[in-house]
Image: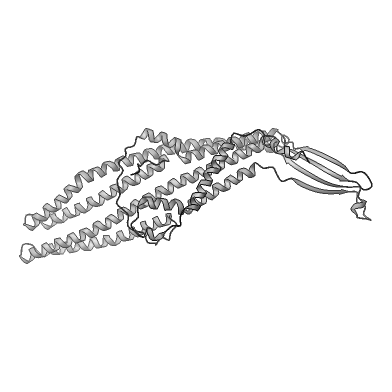
């Protein structure tokens, strides 16, 4: 029995280079677990007040059930590395031989045997199994990081939608008040006979239309609030405070540099690369198992009545080259390796396209926002003031005043939509690159 301790290094083979990767993964998962467990309990009362994006992102990282699921699966993958690299359970047996029918007593048996056996893979095979399991576990951890990036991007997009709808509601209500002022001017002019009653009815009709838009916007605002709450693992109708003002993106981004960073840092690509490495280890293992036998070693203690006790030993090997089963497994792993390599190429192409698309949207939204801020907003506001003054002096019709008011409202809405589009595109760009791009204030 003293031979059993030497079976473990024999089965594992020489020290594997992947042990350092295993230590790093174990440290990363422990850090992640400690961060979740040490985080303070969420305070929903704070979310009922004015909320900022950083707070929502932090809460989503802590609360989101998708992330908790992947974190648990990553830890399960780490345990699989240990399982895959362990020997099968030793086998303890008891046998008896030559027990007479008339006197079924072990003392009358020709021999009683107690044995211990152990199946041992060919040296190096357990190490390959562990490496393949480790690459799968590392890939699961990378998918956690990728999902975290995706959840953060979703929270940001939902927040910017929430911001736009909040601004739309404010603008609609502001212009309801503006139209009420127009109606009072028209009433004064109607009493003096300067205008017809139609100039009084038009702002009233316009106010009814705006009230309807307020109702629609309130409904959409509730849906946006529910989307944020779901990402934070809250009830959809949980109270959520109004968003804070958005500071637009000022950083400029170089497409070539972003693409290189994405190809180097994107967790999805790292996961695909790890799947390739896992398949390579699996293929090497399958090739070895197709030609190299596994062993079974055993030792028995014989108790022979009325004779001296004795012992026996056993060595057995399988014959993998006779059935073709292991060869089929090797061919299957070869196909899987080629599939994983193709998936990696496809993922790289997809990342390049995502970076390009997000970069184009950032630049387009940046130019649109600059146009609204520098040109359209000031001029639309001036147009309303000029039309109002001209209408009061009977130099412009009410329709002209109404058109200028509609234009101002439309420009304000589009300005905030452009601002949200810029921020959403920047969030998508960060997710596509797999890294934070915004400078912290």
Residue 298: which quarter of the image?
top right
Q: Is 202 displayed left or right of 328 in the figure? A: left
Q: In the rendering, at what x and y percent does residue 385 appear?
A: 13, 53
Dividing the picture into quadrants, the one containing residue 136 is top right
Q: Toward which corner of the image does residue 260 lie, by quadrant?
A: top left
Question: What is the quadrant of the N terminus in the image?
Answer: top right
The x and y percentages for residue 361 are 33, 42
* Residue found 28% across the figure and 42% down from its top: 366
Residue drawn at x 50%, y 42% as measured from the top left? 142
Report the side of 295 relative to 311 (left or right). Answer: left
Q: Residue furthest bottom?
A: 191
Q: Residue at x 67, y 42 (%)?
A: 86
Asked whether the viewer can see residue 369, the reply is yes
Coloration mode: one colour
Could you tell me if residue 339 is visible in this image?
A: no
**Nearest the camera: 408 or 92?**
92
Q: Where 416 falls versus 322 (above or below)?
A: below
Quadrant, the C terminus = top left
35 horizontally vs 390: left or right: right
- x and y, in percent, of residue 301 in the image: 84, 44
Q: Position of residue 239 (x, y in %)?
A: 37, 61
Residue at 78%, 47% in the rendered image: 92
Viewer-nearest residue: 216 or 298: 298
């Amino acid at each position: 029995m003293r031979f059993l301790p030497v079976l473990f290094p024999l089965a594992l083979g020489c020290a594997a280079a992947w042990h350092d990767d295993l230590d790093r993964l174990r440290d990363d998962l422990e850090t992640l677990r400690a961060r979740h467990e040490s985080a303070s309990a969420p305070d929903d009362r704070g979310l009922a007040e004015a909320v900022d994006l950083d707070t929502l992102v932090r809460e989503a990282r802590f609360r989101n059930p998708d992330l908790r699921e992947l974190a648990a699966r990553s830890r399960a993958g780490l345990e699989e590395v240990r399982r895959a690299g362990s020997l099968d359970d030793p086998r303890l047996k008891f046998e008896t031989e030559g027990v007479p029918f008339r006197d079924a007593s072990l003392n009358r048996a020709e021999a009683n045997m107690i044995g211990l056996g152990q199946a041992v893979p060919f040296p190096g095979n357990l190490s390959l199994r562990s490496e393949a399991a480790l690459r799968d576990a590392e890939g699961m951890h990378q998918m956690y990081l990728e999902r975290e990036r995706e959840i953060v991007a979703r929270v940001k997009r939902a927040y910017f939608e929430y911001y736009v709808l909040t601004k739309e509601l404010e603008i609609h209500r502001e212009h309801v008040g503006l139209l009420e002022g127009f109606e009072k001017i028209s009433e004064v002019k109607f009493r003096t006979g300067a205008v017809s009653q139609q100039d009084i009815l038009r702002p009233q009709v316009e106010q009814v239309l705006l009230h309807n838009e307020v109702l629609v916007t309130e409904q959409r605002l509730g849906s946006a609030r529910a989307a944020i709450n779901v990402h934070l693992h809250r009830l959809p109708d949980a109270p959520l405070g109004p968003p804070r003002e958005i500071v637009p993106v000022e950083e400029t981004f170089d497409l070539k540099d972003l693409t290189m960073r994405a190809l180097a840092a994107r967790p999805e690509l790292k996961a695909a690369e790890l799947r390739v490495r896992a398949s390579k280890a699996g293929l090497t293992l399958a090739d070895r198992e197709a030609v190299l036998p596994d062993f079974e070693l055993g030792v028995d203690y014989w108790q022979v009545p009325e004779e001296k006790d004795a012992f026996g030993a056993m060595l057995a090997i399988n014959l993998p080259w006779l059935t073709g089963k292991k060869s089929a497994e090797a061919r299957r792993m070869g196909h899987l390796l080629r599939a994983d390599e193709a998936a990696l190429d496809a993922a790289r192409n997809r990342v390049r396209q995502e970076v390009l698309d997000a970069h184009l949207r950032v630049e387009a939204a940046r130019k649109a926002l600059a146009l609204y801020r520098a040109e359209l907003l000031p001029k639309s506001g001036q147009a309303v003031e000029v039309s109002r003054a001209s209408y009061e002096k009977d130099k412009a019709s009410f329709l002209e005043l109404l058109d200028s008011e509609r234009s101002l409202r439309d420009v304000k809405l589009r300005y905030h939509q452009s601002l949200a589009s810029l921020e959403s595109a920047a969030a998508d760009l960060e997710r596509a690159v797999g890294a934070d791009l915004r400078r912290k204030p």
